Amino acid sequence: MTQRATVDHVAPVVMSAYGLTEQQRIISGFPLQGPSTQTISEQLHITRHTVQDHVKSIFEKTGVRTRRELAATVLRE
């Protein structure tokens, strides 16, 4: 029986293909789970501003404008 890849397995590969840094790949996985910027910053022990900077860079590299579009891009790929 063939198993389908899960989003958790595919997302890092897709984000790597867009040239995201390791930290950006880590952060890019969070919008798929739905937490707020504050929650991400608390879990990664970085400031909200740093999270927002990374998210902005992720959006630029992937050509999306929202977290929802980012999730759709990962699921589409």
Image (cartoon, grey):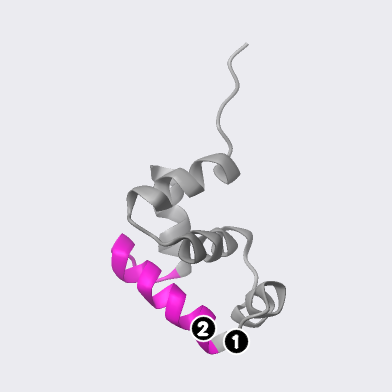
Q: Badge 2: how crowded within 10 Å, few (<14), some, or many (20+)?
A: few
Residue 2 magenta: no
The residue at the point 55 percent across, 61 percent down is: 26
**Quadrant location of the N terminus in the rendered image:** top right
**Quadrant location of the C terminus in the rendered image:** top left
Query: Residue 45, relative to residue 32: is it above or below?
Result: below
Residue 56 magenta: yes
Amino acid of disc 2: Thr
> Which range is magenta?
49-66
Question: Which type of secondary structure does the marked residue at label 1 adopt?
Answer: loop
Q: Is residue 48 left or right of residue 77?
A: right
Question: Which mark identifies residue 47?
Answer: 1
Query: Is residue 3 visible in the rendered structure shown here?
Result: yes
Instruction: Name the residue furthest top.
Output: 1
**Which one is in front, 32 or 11?**
11
Residue 39 at x, y percent in the picture: 69, 77
**Which one is in front, 69 or 14?**
14
Q: CA distance from mark 2 to mark 1?
A: 5 Å
Question: Which type of secondary structure does the marked residue at label 2 adopt?
Answer: helix
Where residue 4 sits, quadrant-wise, is: top right
- In the picture of the structure, the residue carrying the numbered disc 2 is 50
Residue 23 at x, y percent in the picture: 51, 66
Q: Badge 1: how crowded within 10 Å, few (<14), some, or many (20+)?
A: some
Contact, mark 2 vs mark 1 (Cβ under 8 Å): yes
The residue at the point 56 percent across, 40 percent down is: 9
Query: Is residue 65 visible in the rendered structure shown here?
Result: no
The residue at the point 45 percent across, 75 percent down is: 54
Residue 47 at x, y percent in the picture: 60, 87
Amino acid of disc 1: Thr
Query: Residue 5, relative to residue 32: is it above or below?
Result: above
